[in-house]
Structures are given as structure tokens and as C-alpha cells.
Image: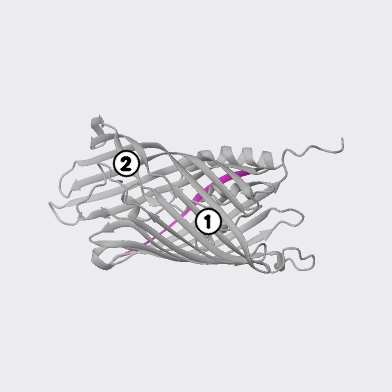
Amino acid sequence: MIKKIILSACLLISFVSFAQQGTASPYSFYGIGDIKFKGTLENRSMGGVSVEQDSIHLNVENPASYASLMQTTFTVGGTYGTSKVKSQTETASSTRSTFDYLLLGIPMGKFGAGFGLIPVSSVGYKIRNDNSGTEGLTSSQYEGKGGLNKVFLALGYKIKPNWSVGADMQYNFGKIETTSIEAITGVSSATREINTSTLSGVNFNIGTMYQTKIYKKTELFTSLSYTFGSNLKSDSERTIEVDGDATSVDDLNSSTLKLPNKLTIGAGIGEARKWLVGTTVAFQGNGKFQNYYNTSDDVRYEKYAKYAIGGYYLPNYGSFTSYLSRVTYRAGLKYEKIGLIVNNESIKDVGVTLGAGFPITGTFSNVNFGIEYGKKGTVSSNLIQENYLNFSLSFSFNDKWFVKSKFN
């Protein structure tokens, strides 16, 4: 049954991932767009903390985690989000539904393998400057859509029962399209410029995880991963139209965007299948994200940093009398410097997360629900503040594969 679910989901989501507009943030105008959280809902509901070697849940951020899997695990997730953006004088609201990930992990003795599809970034903005009421002034409209996705293949190996290592290879691909329209009040013609960039590139990630008992049932969990810097090839095309008729179509020379290296460190204490409190910090170098259509004298890129704290509580995973005792309750906090400086103001993203994992009776499978509330940006320095509220849902199916039947 799980194999049929995986096949159907792969066909559906492969299409959806290209068609969706995964953000409404005005800050997605810059670079490769709004960077997405590249992990499962279970980890996202803990602020992004992902330090435990879990036997039935996937940890995409550290490939060493796949070595701890005991059952084949397939998971798929999505988000319904609302956001309100405001400046010092205006406000606007938007909603969206997005695909978050499709992942499969397979245990193979001391080895574990994983592969999947995850959105990396998303572009989705509409900005309008309306001067239609004044003769001779220019009105403009800017719109962007698209983003970057990745497919990956990972392999983990358990050196010792409490120590594992792993690596993965990621292929990044996507397309970003931006449109700008300008019209002068009192002049009948309007000009539209359409820019399309097709992105592609490969990068690699390595990691290790270690855990040890520190007191009776209490254990220390640690996680370390490193993503190597890489290049993104950008093939671009520009079309200029006047009153709907194309006057020029230019195939521009390929350019190179640089994705910086990233170091992620995590640690936590807890009791397996009972409780966990942990923290994760991540640091990323200064990348080169400017493309010819989104450069600005008021914009610079800086080093990315993230600090998160979170955990979970599971009252009694083996309870036969109380379903609520088998529910996993999660919570977390996050603080990010997203790596963008606009008008000399460093853009930050601060949020709080809550979530719960509901087991499917009679199986190791579960349904997860999460809520995330946060704020990105500021109204200072003539900028825009974005307040967002996300509702996420994921399904995690667990089963044993490659087990020879004892009965015909």
C-alpha cells in the first residue's frame, strides 16, 4: 500500500512543485527568493531543532540520521499560510498553499538511504506604484514568481550503535520569472519587460551524529553537518514588449550565482521516545545572489545566522488506554538573520512554533500538525514588515520493506 501512495504522490507533487507560488514576501524580490526551511514538519515544529537519531522520523538536515532508521519511512508535507505586510503608511494581506517536501528513507542494516524533493527558495511578490492620477508621472508594477528546488540522494552509515556519519548529493534546479510594467499617465503606450532565469547546479552535504547516556535514562544528543559552497548556473532571457508586441528578445550570457558554505551544530538532552530539549545554531557565508534584473544600490548580502531552541514531550508512547498519552507535543523558538541588508538594515526573521504528532493506531505511522507565527523585516528605514501565520500538515507512513515472507 505504501508503495502505491509514494508513486501517486511523486507524480502529483512533481507537477505541483513547478506550478506553486510558495511565498508572498516582498523580500523574495532579492537573490534567489525567500529561503525555505529544508526539513520536516516534526523538526520545524521545534523551531528547527533536529539532533536526535530517530528510528521512524526523517531528519533531512543531517544525512547521518538515515543510518538510524528501523523502518522504511515515506513522508509528505504542505503548508497553508497567511501574511500581512505593512509599511509606515499602508498594509496588505495574502494567502497561499504550498508543497513542503516529499521524502523517502530506507534502512539497510548499518546503512540507511534517503532521497526526496524539497523547495529551496520561492519568489512571489506583486509591487505597484500608482501615479495614474497625475499627468506625466510614471506608474509601475513589478511581479515575480518561481523559485529553486532540489532533489537529493543521501547515505548514512552507523560506525557504532551511538555514532553515525553520512553524506548527500543535491541537484538544484528551478526557474524565476519577473515582470515589470511602466506606463506614463496621459501616454497611450505601456512598456513591459519579462526576465526569465533558469537555474541549475550541484552541491554536497556531510554530517555526523553522536549520542551517549549521561544519567540513568537521560542521554546527550549531538549533531554536526556541513554544506559545501557551490555554483548555480543561470541562463537568462529578456523580452521587451510595447503595447503587447515584442520588440526584442535577448538570450543573455550565462551567469554564475554562488551558494555559500553552511555549518550547522546541534545539541540536546532527553530520553528517547519520552522528551527532548535541544538547540541548533547555523552559520552561512556571504553568497553571491545578484542577477542582472534584481540588483540595487540599497541592497547588500551578509552572512546568514540562525539560533533555535525547542523540544518535544511524549507522555507514554506505549499506552493502551489513553490516545492523548501517545501524542507527541512539540514547541520551539527561532531567530534568523536571513543574510540580506536593505537600506543599511539587517533583515531578521523571528518566530515561535507549536506542533503535535498523532499516531495512527496499530502502526508506527503518524499525522503531524504544526503552527508557526513570526515576523520578518521592519517598518524602520522605509522598509516593510511581514507578519505571517502558517498552518502545516504532514503524513508519515512507516512499513517494513524487503522482508521475506515466512508463509505462502
User: For the stretch drawn in magenta, what is the main secondary structure?
Assistant: strand
Asked if the stretch drawn in magenta spans residue 105, the answer is yes
Q: Give the residue type at disc 1.
A: Ser
| Quadrant of the image containing the N terminus | top right
* Residue 140 percent location from the top left of the image: 23, 50
Count neighbours of disc 2 (C-alpha within 10 A) and say few if under 14, some if 14 to 19, many if 20 or more: many
Please tell me which of labels 1 and 2 falls first in the chain.
Answer: 1
Q: Mark 1 points at which residue?
A: 223
**Residue situated in front as seen by the camera: 222 or 283:** 222
Q: Name the residue under label 2.
A: 257
Residue 306 falls in which quadrant of the image?
A: bottom left
Look at 56% across and 61% down and name the residue there: 370
Count neighbours of disc 1 (C-alpha within 10 A) and say few if under 14, some if 14 to 19, many if 20 or more: many
Per the rendered image, the range of residues in magenta is: 91-106
| Label 1 element class | strand
Q: Is residue 200 above or below residue 392?
A: above
Q: Give the residue type at disc 2.
A: Leu
Look at 61% across and 55% down and name the residue there: 53
For the question of whether residue 382 can be seen, the reply is yes
| Label 2 element class | strand
Counting labels gives 2
* Residue 314 percent location from the top left of the image: 66, 66
Q: In this view, does 250 lie above or below 52?
A: above
Q: Is residue 52 above or below residue 115?
A: below
